[in-house]
Image (cartoon, helix red, strand yellow):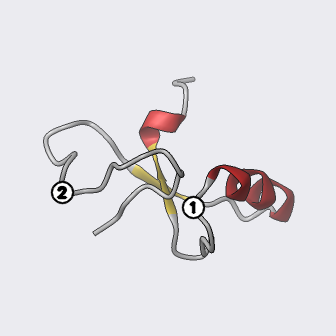
Amino acid sequence: MPSCSIRSCHNNSHNTKNKEISYLCFPKDEALIEKWKVLCKENVNPKIARVCSQHFHPI
């Protein structure tokens, strides 16, 4: 069950099942990974961690 890795977020696929929220993988770029990790829970593994779409602005 995917869940958001952002420190202050409690979203997971169970409690957002009826909402239009997706869970995105970490980027491949090391510099971006480090920026994302600053906002995430401790010991986050970027290979399996996800961030929910509520933390992104639509293009």
Query: What residue did someone put label 1 on?
Result: 41
Q: Secondary structure at mark 1?
A: loop
Q: Residue at x 60, y 75 (%)?
A: 45
Q: Residue at x 34, y 64 (%)?
A: 2
x, y (%) of residue 46?
63, 70
In which quadrant is the N terminus drawn?
A: bottom left
41 with respect to 30 (left or right): left
What is the crowding at mark 2: few (fewer than 14 residues within 10 Å), some, or many (at least 20)? few
40, 34: nearer the viewer: 40
Which amino acid is tagged 1? Lys
Q: Residue at x 32, y 41 (%)?
A: 21
x, y (%) of residue 3?
37, 60
Quadrant in the picture for residue 42: bottom right
Q: Residue at x 74, y 60 (%)?
A: 33
44 with respect to 29 (left or right): left
Q: Secondary structure at mark 2?
A: loop
Check the image and report above or below for 59 versus 37. above
37, 22: nearer the viewer: 37
Q: How many marks?
A: 2
x, y (%) of residue 27?
68, 59
Find the distance from the CA under tag 2 to the CA under tag 1: 19 Å
Check the image and report above or below for 55 versus 16. above
Of callouts 2 and 1, the N-terminal one: 2
Query: What residue did someone put label 2 on?
Result: 14
**Farthest right residue in view:** 31
In which quadrant is the C terminus drawn?
A: top right
Which amino acid is tagged 2? His
What is the crowding at mark 1: few (fewer than 14 residues within 10 Å), some, or many (at least 20)? some
